[in-house]
Amino acid sequence: MKKTKKQWKEYYASAEFKKKYEYAGNDLGAVWTEEKTVFKLWSPAAKEVSLHLYQDGYDVPSYEVHPMAESDPGVWFCQVPGDLHGVYYDFSIQIEEEICLTYDPYARACGVNGKRSMVIDLKKTDPVGWENDTAPAAGNEEFIYELHVKEFSWDKAGGFPEECRGRYSAFQCPATTLHNDGEHATGIGWLKRLGVTHVQLMPVYDFGSVDERESGDQFNWGYDPVNYNIPEGSYSSDPYHGEIRIKEFKELVQSLHREGFRVIMDVVYNHTFSLENCFQKTAPWYYYRVHDDGTVSNGSACGNDVASERPMCSKYILESVLYWVDEYHIDGFRFDLMGLLDVDLMNEIRHELDVRYGKGEKLIYGEPWTAAETAMEDKRVQALSKNIGLLDENIGMFSDHIRDSIRGCVFIKNKPGFVNGGKGLEDAVLSSIRAWGSKKKKIVKAPSQIISYLSCHDNQTLWDKLQETTRDEKLRRRQYRLAVGIYMTCLGRIFFLSGEEFLRTKNGLDNSYNADISINRLDWARAWEEQEMADYYRGLILLRDRLPGLFDKTCNAPDRIKTYIKGRGVVGVTVDNVGEGYPCRWETLCVVYNSTHHAQEIKLPAGEWEMLASESDSFLWQDPVRTEDTAVVEPVGMLLLGKKE
């Protein structure tokens, strides 16, 4: 009789199973050498397993079948002589009375749509000079720019070569210009001009929501994992040959490093595309959470939750993260629905990265929430915002508190925030400045745990949100600049959606995950039409990188805030800006935000002050106007001042 989901859950929780079947080796998958390939598959419930070899990654029949034997309890082993680089494979598995074919959970390469795994000599996928590829040196501040591979280069106005549009190869085109005019930078040149330091790529592992055979205009964000350790094929020039996507993604990373950017991967270890996959076929219900009543846990709202607390599952996730760093030189990870993962796993990932690469060298942050309740076991604690104190100080969380306080709730379109008419939000903005803390109690360990942002791929863009609350465009633009001025002067790491700097719009759509590419693509003509706004971002980026009082990520950073300014619709702070080992022109900063429709005169501490940025000019610091005693903050405006030593 077939086991029920509940019976599988009880079986995996038993002491007998844990003692017998948890495998400590790091050699699962297909390990290639020129002389032989060793295949190992963890399938503890299997009665029989066979290896099938193919010349093609999609539809030709197998040319060899090899029976596999258990080398360790639950680990099925087969060794095939000869150089198998480029050979495709899958497994035939019998569990209970059913026999099925499955691809390899530990595969490093695959054919089109991930249907079959592929043996790979990874050295053959290295671009020229890959052994010398390194990330650019870290600066004072991280400015993280969220990008989707296809969105980045799809717009014809961007000037990308036709064969590169929507593909990895577009990132190897550092000199594209608007309509190829040779003057107005797009793509990589635009990012360099803007001043971002980190490019966060939306999912680039192999996902299931786009048919790689005819991707064309198909679009999806990609939060639908199929093969966690293989790049997506629809962004490659040839999805049929497994080595191509690997090489082209490495070339993308190499190009971004060469141009001065670090690369962050958006990873989705919390759920899979469907339950018809290699995990279920090799170990039914081991990798997924099930409630005690036998129903499938769905805290992701995508049909399933990955059981990160189970040892072989947490081992898989940790090894996957380390693999992307080791093989692809990835510089950090953004964890989708991190609240569905457990605190122990996140801290272990942080620890292993620190041991290998240096403390905090690789960025780690994620979404500290879930879509619904999840059936986490073993009394593990979820990596939710309320549990931030249990996480390492270098594991960051997106601050929806900062986002919603400034612009308004993302789930109620017409609900305003501080900048667009919301009332009673002064204390919320002040706590945002302190990186989610309060004056009385430190809720977080350090600003390194906070991602300050206004928009990302989810929900409405900032421009579209403000359109819901403010009809007058002139006022809306002032609100936009005020919003940017606030979050660019909050403690924490700075993150923004690609195109936010040029008023990106999706025509009000708040969930464009599979909308037409014409809605999602970056509009490069709009980028230059809104150059003034982009320059406003650029000035604040350049300025913040010079202000220790803002870019400090240590646990003592919130203590730099010395005084508070608070009135109806007006808030501000003074900040100690002395940076040890970092010479700075200003020993103290004063920043004030005015959301009212009237100018506000602010009394300043004694001394001579220089105006560094306002709602209309973020480059004042280059030739500052001096003032003493008082300063005037314009209606729906901000003012950042610095007091000289």
Image (cartoon, rainbow, N blue to C red):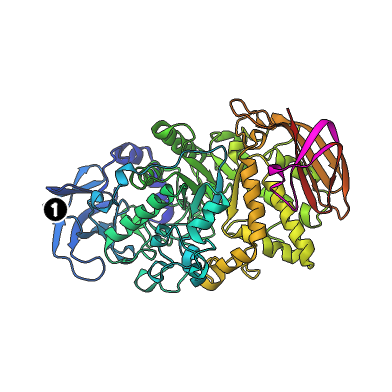
Mark 1: few/some/many CA within 10 Å (<14, 14-19, 20+): some
Badge 1 element: loop
Instruction: Residue at 64% x, 52% y: name it.
Output: 537
Residue 516, image x, y percentages? 52, 73
Residue 97, image x, y percentages? 27, 60
In this orientation, which residue lies closer to the viewer: 388 or 578? 578
In this orientation, which residue lies closer to the viewer: 198 or 465? 198
Q: Could you tell me which quadrant the N terminus lies in? A: bottom left
Callout 1 amino acid: Asp
Q: Residue placed farthest to the top in the image?
A: 580
Q: Image quarter for residue 319?
A: top left
Instruction: Residue at 64% x, 55% y: name it.
Output: 535
Vertical side of 104 occupied by 505: above or below: below
Vertical side of 23 occupied by 176: above or below: below
Q: Is residue 82 magenta?
A: no
Would you say residue 399 is visible in this rendering? Answer: no
In the visual, does 309 lie left or right of 70? right
In the visual, does 140 lie left or right of 168? right
Vertical side of 28 occupied by 413: above or below: below
Mark 1 lies on residue: 83
Total residue callouts: 1
Q: Image quarter for residue 530?
A: bottom right
The residue range painted magenta reads 604-627
